[in-house]
Image: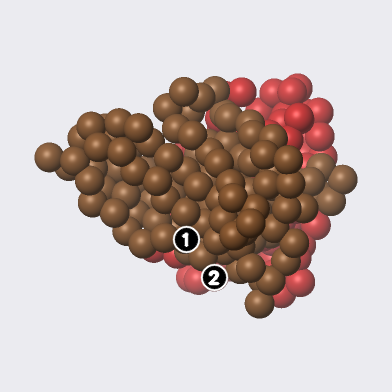
Chain colours: A red, B brown
Amino acid sequence: QSALTQPASVSGSPGQSITISCTGTSSDVGNYNLVSWYQQHPGKVPKLMIYEGSKRPSGVSNRFSGSKSGNTASLTISGLQAEDEADYHCCSYAGRSSWVFGGGTKLTV
Amino acid sequence: EVQLVQSGAEVKKPGESLKISCKGSGYSFTNYWIGWVRQMPGKGLEWMGNIYPGDSDTRYSPPFRGQVTISADRSISTAYLQWNSLKASDTATYYCARPLAEVSGAYIDLWGQGTLVTVSS
């Protein structure tokens, strides 16, 4: 399977909202509602922010939300804060116990 | 505590072999997949493959098939990622991760701390 497609970078001002897209195919994103999103600060281990497309783990701010339309999943961050500046990676289940990541998006606040 | 603990950083020369490890603790190691994820310097995450220690069922992402070997020793709750002949392009941080099964949401709920592998002559 090929990597999912994410924009290389997005930016926003504090308080604004941004959306990061993650485009796959009908074999992964389009076929399963099993996209997860991870936040990664420099030198740190990725942190789960969204799972099953739109669910937030305990402790994750409700400023983070996820959605999906067709073969494209999206992560929206509202009320941007300086601490949100990080890399964001999407990941989709691709069937038969396999997974695929996107290329990652650098968010600048 | 539920955790994955990886082996330490490695510095190798091109052509050398290497095996890095990931030890699981605090949970039933044989009942969960363990995956390996590559992150080249300044780049995104790449899924390399995964193994189910319970029966050693192993899956490889196409770009990594034939390039690495994933294995596990369930008697010591440890998974491995192995290279027979390293290349400079293998320089990266490698994470082990625990992805949940499809029926449980198929997301990664546990990460190792990462192992930096540097390949340089």
The residue shown at (21%, 35%) is B14
Amino acid beneath label 2:
Gln
The chain that hosts pointer 2 is A
Q: Quadrant of residue B68?
A: top left
At numbered mark 2, what does the secondary structure look like: helix, strand or loop?
A: loop
The residue nearer to you, when weighing B89 against A19, is: B89
Eye-nearest disc, 1 or 2: 1
Q: Which residue is mark 2?
A: A81
Give the class, few, some or many, for how many residues have Cα within 10 Å of label 2's Cα (few <14, many ≥20). some
Quarter of the figure with the C terminus of chain B? top left
Q: Which residue is mark 1?
A: B6
The residues tagged by marks 1 and 2 sit, at their Cα atoms, a distance apart of 32 Å
Q: Is residue B94 above or below residue B70?
A: below
Give a yes or no on whether discs 1 and 2 share a subunit: no
**Does the image show residue A83?**
yes
Of the pair A17 and A25, the residue shown nearer to us: A25
Secondary structure of the residue carrying numbered label 1: strand
The quarter of the picture where the N terminus of chain B appears is: bottom right
| Residue positioned most to the left | B121
- Residue sitting at the far bottom: B1
Q: What amino acid is found at the position of numbered circle 1 in the picture?
A: Gln
